[in-house]
Amino acid sequence: MAGNIKIVVCKTSEEVAKKCAGMFIEQVRNKPASVLGFATGSTPEKTYAEIARLSKAEKVSFAKVTSFNLDEYWGLDGDHDQSYRYFMNDKLFNHIDIRTWNTNVLNGKARFPAVECQAYEDKIVSVGGVDLWILGIGNNGHIAFNEPGSPVDSRTRLVSLTQSTIESNSDGRFFKNANEVPRCALSTGIGTIRDAKKLVLLATGAKKADAVAKAVEGAFSPDVPASLLQDHPDCTFILDTDSASKLKK
Ligand code: GLP
C-alpha cells in the first residue's frame, strides 16, 4: 500500500519540535476545548518545551483541554520518576494551564487492568474522541507499546514489552539498566490510536530511519505497527533528515 501518510522533513530536531508544537497551538487556538493525545519518550520533549513557550507567548490557554496519554508502565505509580504520568507532569503539564483533572494517564497500579483499560476507552468516547494525537516510534516500529504483531483493531490493554524495547528504554536516557524496566505496560491499541481525527508522528535520529522507511513505504502489516497508520485519513510524519534518510522518495 502506498499509503496516505504526509511527510514533512526538517533540517533539525528543533525544527521538528517547532512544526509539531505549532500544530498543537493552532488546534487549541481554533478549538479551546480540544481533546489532545500525548506521547512520552525523548523525541517529543523539545515539542513539549515549545508548546509551553508558545502557550505563554501567544496566550493560548489549555484550561479547557482534555488529554489522554498513550501508555503507562505496569506496576509503576504516578510518583515514580520513570512513570509516564511523572514524565508528563514534569515535561508539559506543570508548564501550561491544563487542569490536572482533565489529564488522563493510565494507572499502572490499577487493581483490575481490564477494567482500567475499558474505562479509558469509554472516557475517550465520552469526550468525543481525540482531535490530535502526537506519536513517537520505537526502533522496531512500535507505536505506544504496541509491539510487532499487534492487531490493527487492538484496543487499550495490558501488553508485554519486547526485549528490544526494554533495551532501548534502558540505554541511560531513562532506566539505568534493563533489570529496572517493567516487563509489561498498559497501552492504548492501534485501533484506539487510529480513531483519532488527526495524527502526527515524530522521529529524529538515524536509529529511527529503518522503522520510518518500513512504516511509510513498506507493507501495511502488524509486523511494523506504525505501518498500520498508512490508511489513516490525516496522518503526518514530521522527521529530521537523519530519520528520513532511508525513504526512497
Ligand atoms: C516508548 C514509548 C513510545 C515511544 C518510544 C520511543 O516505548 N512507549 O510511545 O514512541 O518509547 O521513544 P524515544 O522517543 O525515546 O525514542
Image (cartoon, rainbow, N blue to C red):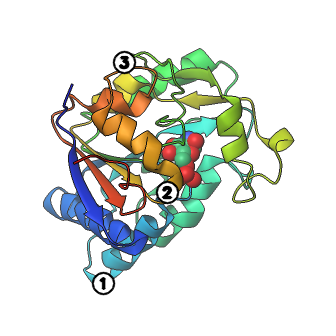
Name the amino acid type tagged 3: Val
Q: Quadrant of the N terminus?
A: top left
Where does label 3 land, which residue?
A: 152
Name the amino acid type tagged 2: Ala
Q: Which mark is residue 206?
A: 2
The label nearer to you, 3 versus 1, is 3
Question: Mark 3 vs mark 1: which is more N-terminal?
Answer: 1
Name the amino acid type tagged 1: Ala
Does mark 1's beta carbon lie closer than 8 Å to ligand 1?
Answer: no
Q: CA distance from mark 3 to mark 2?
A: 27 Å
Q: Which mark is residue 57?
A: 1
Residue at 32% over, 77% down: 54
Q: Residue 181 or 142: which is nearer the viewer?
A: 142
Question: Mark 3 vs mark 2: which is more N-terminal?
Answer: 3
Q: CA distance from mark 3 to mark 1?
A: 40 Å
Residue at 49% over, 57% down: 206
Rendered location of residue 160, percent (x, y):
66, 23
* Label 1 environment density (alpha carbons within 10 Å; few <14, some 14–19, many ≥20): few
Q: Quadrant of residue 112?
A: top right
Rendered location of residue 79, percent (x, y):
72, 52
Q: Residue 208 or 195: which is nearer the viewer?
A: 208
Does mark 2's beta carbon lie closer than 8 Å to ligand 1?
Answer: no
Q: Residue 159 or 29: which is nearer the viewer?
A: 159
Contact, mark 3 vs mark 2 (Cβ under 8 Å): no
- Dot 2 falls on a residue whose secondary structure is helix
Is residue 84 found left or right of 103 in the rendered image? right
Q: Quadrant of residue 20?
A: bottom left
